Image (tube, rainbow, N blue to C red):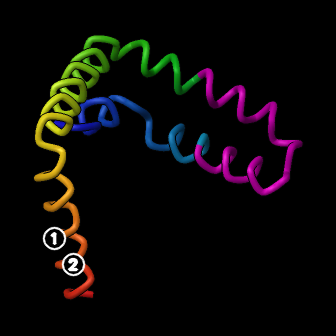
Amino acid sequence: GGLKPVIRGLNPDDVNALTSSLIQILQGQGGNLESLFARTSSFTNALADNGQTVEQLIDSLKQTLATVSTDGAKFSRAVDQLEQLTTGLA
């Protein structure tokens, strides 16, 4: 579930290179903009090749958001409890 089916179809080196380019640009190294566009193109092509998986992911997210909006208070409490648990374990 989640992003795993989409990510599984992507080249890890492309994802890492794209992420690295984004970080460098956000840190003020604008000379990497051309590299970012090239990597973004490769990344979006890979996503396009997995269009059906992306659609399924979006549908799943819609269902999840509908559930969260219906049971927002319960979800919020669960997130708070999870945060307390992870803080206690850390």
Q: Residue at x 84, y 53 (%)?
A: 28
Q: Is residue 1 left or right of residue 16?
A: left
| Circles 2 and 1 in contact, beta carbons < 8 Å | yes
The answer to which of 61 and 67 lies nearer the viewer is: 67
The image shows residue 89, relative to residue 25, as above or below, that is: below
The answer to which of 36 and 26 lies nearer the viewer is: 26
Q: Secondary structure at mark 1?
A: helix
Q: Position of residue 87 (x, y in %)?
A: 27, 83
Q: Amino acid at mark 1?
A: Gln
Query: Where is the N terminus found, in terms of image quarters?
Result: top left
Query: Where is the C terminus found, in terms of image quarters?
Result: bottom left
Q: Position of residue 62 (x, y in %)?
A: 23, 24
Q: Position of residue 52 (x, y in %)?
A: 26, 12
The image shows residue 22, relative to residue 70, as above or below, that is: below
Give the crowd class for mark 2: few <14, some 14-19, many >=20 residues within 10 Å.
few
For disc 1, the marked residue is 81
Q: Residue farthest to the front?
A: 73
Q: Residue at x 24, y 31 (%)?
A: 5
- The span picked out in magenta is 19-41
Q: Is residue 33 left or right of residue 56?
A: right
Task: Locate residue 63: give its quadrant.
Answer: top left
Q: Taken as a whole, is the magenta stretch helix, strand or loop?
A: helix
The image shows residue 49, relative to residue 57, as above or below, that is: above
Q: Is residue 84 left or right of residue 18?
A: left
User: In the rendering, which numbered label is found on residue 84?
Assistant: 2
Give the crowd class for mark 1: few <14, some 14-19, many >=20 residues within 10 Å.
few
Q: Is 30 contained in the magenta span?
A: yes
Q: CA distance from mark 2 to mark 1?
A: 5 Å
Q: Amino acid at mark 2?
A: Gln
Q: Is 23 contained in the magenta span?
A: yes
Task: Locate residue 2: give its quadrant.
Answer: top left
